[in-house]
Image (cartoon, coloured by chain):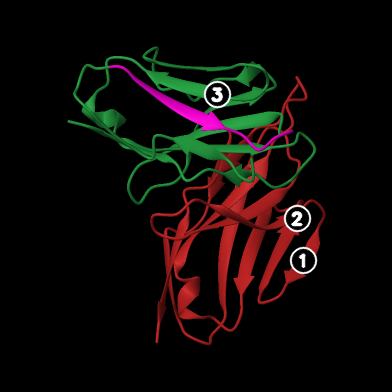
Amino acid sequence: GQSLEQPSEVTAVEGAIVQINCTYQTSGFYGLSWYQQHDGGAPTFLSYNALDGLEETGRFSSFLSRSDSYGYLLLQELQMKDSASYFCAVREVSWSSASKIIFGSGTRLSIRP
Amino acid sequence: GAGVSQSPSNKVTEKGKDVELRCDPISGHTALYWYRQSLGQGLEFLIYFQGNSAPDKSGLPSDRFSAERTGGSVSTLTIQRTQQEDSAVYLCATNRRVDTEAFFGQGTRLTVV
């Protein structure tokens, strides 16, 4: 089956660093993505990892280990506006070469002053 | 268009009525996805289109749900004989087949009373 596991909630302090983990189990794999969703808004793309290692984009970094079926999103210098839900997602490759995107259940990040 | 457009933004319907939800993708985006999101929950995959065909419709919850796409563009998600448990936000996302990023519309908030 296909599944992605991530913590349901994480709380952190403004200015600190937080890591949101994601483990996945899929029948095919084409990369791990992260999306951010503020309350009442649509998910927006943050990052994508196709190969092992760390990708850095400003205050956000994303890591992938394909051998461990594991990745994480690292948020540094947390700001109050980073309070949102964060979803990991995998793009699968199936026998038909079609590729759908499957999302995890999301991690709600709450930031305290 | 500049972004993914969904209509209506809000829909209140009586139990037992049929509803149609519309998604206008970004021009040139051949892949189109429908997701359902209940309050505070993750993104539940419903159906995936590549062009006008649907290689994966495994997420449709019941035969009351159907979707079509015409001209490789606009998609309509139809829910027949709506039930209260159908109340949720229905999100549409699109991308070019080889892209890694999916672009989401603002969603249709469906309330069945």
Is disc 3 surrounded by few (<14), some (14 to 19) or many (20+) residues within 10 Å?
many
Is disc 2 surrounded by few (<14), some (14 to 19) or many (20+) residues within 10 Å?
many
Rendered view: B32 above or below B103: above
Chain letter belonging to callout 1: A
Q: Position of residue A27 (x, y in %)?
A: 68, 32
User: In the drawing, what numbered circle is on residue B75?
Assistant: 3
Q: Residue at x 58, y 84 (%)?
A: A77
The colour applied to the residues of chain B in this rendering is green
Q: Which residues are magenta?
A: B18-28
- Image quadrant holding the N terminus of chain B, namely top right
Q: Position of residue A33 (x, y in %)?
A: 66, 52
Circle 2 is placed at which residue position? A49
Report the amino acid beneath label 2. Asn
Along the line of sight, the residue nearer the viewer: A62 or B104: B104
Q: Residue at x 44, y 46 (%)?
A: B42
Circle 1 is placed at which residue position? A55
Q: Position of residue A96 (x, y in %)?
A: 75, 19
Asked whether residue A1 appears in the rendered view, the answer is: no
SS at badge 3: strand
Q: Position of residue A72 (x, y in %)?
A: 63, 63
Give the mark nearest the N terminus, 1 or 2: 2
- The chain in red: A
Q: Are marks 3 and 2 on the same chain?
A: no
Alpha carbon distance from label 3 to label 1: 34 Å
Kindly indicate the quadrant of the structure image that contains residue A71: bottom right
Asked whether residue B71 appears in the rendered view, the answer is: yes
- State yes or no: residue A76 in magenta: no
Chain letter belonging to callout 3: B
* Most distant residue in the front direction: B1
* Most distant residue in the right direction: A51
